[in-house]
Amino acid sequence: MSQAFDVVVIGGGPGGYIAAIRAAQLGFKVACIDEWKNAAGGPAPGGTCTNVGCIPSKALLQSSEHFEHANHHFADHGISTGKVTMDVAKMVGRKDAVVKQNNDGILYLFKKNKVTFFHGRGSFVAAADGGYQIKVAGAAEEVITGKQVVVATGSNARALPGVPFDEEHVLSNDGALRIGAVPKKLALIGSGVIGLEMGSVWRRLGADVTILEGLPTFLGAVDEQIAKEAKKAFDKQGLKIELGVKVGEIKTGKKGVNVAYTNAKGEAVSLDVDKLIVSIGRVPNTIGLNAEAVGLQLDERGAIVVDGDCKTNLPGVWAVGDVVRGPMLAHKAEEEGVAVAERMAGQHGHVNFNTIPWVIYTSPEIAWVGRTEQQLKADGVAYKAGTFPFLANGRARALGDTTGMVKFLADAKTDEILGVHIVGPMASELISEAVVAMEFKASAEDIARICHAHPSLSEATKEAALAVDKRTLNF
Ligand code: FAD
Ligand code: NAI
């Protein structure tokens, strides 16, 4: 007799494991199936985010930032260290330990919330008895049933046509997080989020890094003024970013990789590097789901088609996270997971797509929420802008990191905040205030009137809000 559940979640990344936990909290009998294996072949729930995404990348960014500080900034504080060296194996080992803590944490949360975890691949078998039969192919094979199913199977790295990832010379995000020694020369294709974060890690550790971007503009989705400021900082650090290139043939040999490309001036360039990271976006993952068995509808990109509530074309089947439309972000996946669980319980789960923050964890960090100045112009919205530079912020001076600014965009008539854009220290943390403000439909004046601790970076947020009304106090 197969085990029967109210809810079966396929995929244990941030979308899936959070959906499973919330559904269990709401009284459902829940199973979560995830196939990710750790090095020993054991379960490693947490998906891309935990295993080869958000968490390990931030661990390496932290280690490499410490290295950069020790090498270049400690002396400003009167600290002398002598020659600083990096033990890459130890850094990668630490990253692996951080990942394992997160894997174990999720397994603990499943136990705590009485979610039954299955380690293996989940696939649709058939619709049955007002629900669905799902095969779990793991160490053993079994079929379980779910009255409702949540698909949260995530995404995979997109490869360049004809250039498969060998994870030795041509690396996806997976291989990029496991490089065993600092490459002398590293190229990345795509100057998006992964290109900039991974490029920063290996540049800080001493690699000569070139990022090749197809588009003529740098970070086109980011507010132009902020992107310009960030580019200036990356240029100064020695991160070579070539825009408007056309990548041609890529040849791998014993020693490394040769990348042929045409630069923005139309010149043919041949670049030899030790490693190449391809970071040109991700594709939804439905491999092995056997979607055809039940007629689950996919779009031309392979994403599962859902409505605004994450309902698929099949009754009782939902899909969340990277495998559906919208930004490929862990917190977006989580919010959808919670909302779906609550909808299954007859509640009114809600995800506000207008207030999903973005963060790029480089140095300086880049973070934003809401619309950019160029979007407001394109939408014909009358707006006021206010900026405040970290150069004029006492805490930033004390930290020794005064790069960047906070920028507010508010409705010209109502003063409602329409977008907040930050480039600078701890932008990832500062952006939360803007998200809260926008969720509560606050005006720039509201933020300007709130008492912010001194000295703190958050005072730059208050000052940028004041700047909307042209009345900064410290600039
Ligand atoms: P995933 O995390 O991809 O999880 C899907 C899970 O389902 C996986 O464990 C997979 O093995 C499993 N699975 C798939 N098919 C099956 C099946 N048939 N049966 C069983 N299991 C299956 N986002 C951020 O918000 N912040 C960041 O800082 C950030 N950094 C990133 C850095 C990198 C290098 C990368 C690659 C991504 C990063 N992201 C970040 C994006 C983030 O990782 C994804 O948006 C997020 O993981 C999506 O969650 P998900 O649950 O939809 O899918
Ligand atoms: P991306 O979409 O951020 O950037 C891809 C870049 O590659 C774009 O600038 C694009 O113009 C360029 N490109 C595409 N094809 C190209 C080609 N043939 N030649 C040259 N350039 C080309 O994708 P990325 O960096 O791979 O990351 C995938 C996703 O993972 C992100 O969109 C984001 O959703 C998520 N992520 C989030 C992070 C965060 O929140 N901090 C960190 C890393 C990833």
Image (cartoon, helix red, strand yellow):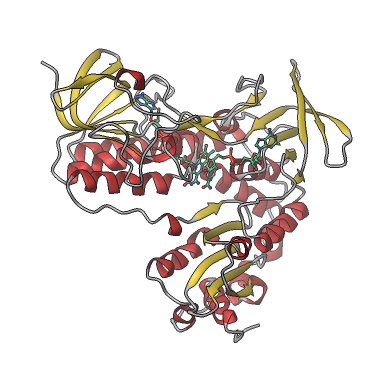
78 versus 294 height, above or below: below
Residue situated in front as seen by the camera: 345 or 293: 293
Q: Position of residue 17 (x, y in %)?
A: 31, 38
Q: Residue furthest top?
A: 140
Q: Quadrant of residue 350?
A: bottom left
Q: Residue furthest front?
A: 380
Quarter the N terminus occupies:
top left
Please name the residue shown 74% across and 27% down the image.
274
164 versus 214 height, above or below: above
Q: Quadrant of ligand 1?
A: top left
Q: Residue furthest left?
A: 1
Q: Is residue 302 visible?
A: yes
Please name the residue shown 83% across and 38% down the image.
263
Q: Is residue 424 visible?
A: no
Q: Is residue 280 left or right of residue 29?
A: right
Q: Position of residue 199 (x, y in %)?
A: 67, 41
Q: Position of residue 156 (x, y in %)?
A: 50, 29
Q: Is residue 236 left or right of residue 58?
A: right
Q: Is residue 188 left or right of residue 433?
A: right
Quarter the C terminus occupies:
bottom right
Q: Quadrant of residue 285?
A: top left
Q: Position of residue 453 (x, y in %)?
A: 47, 78
Q: Quadrant of residue 114?
A: top left
Residue situated in front as seen by the camera: 424 or 71: 424
Give the mark count. Answer: 0
256 versus 215 height, above or below: above
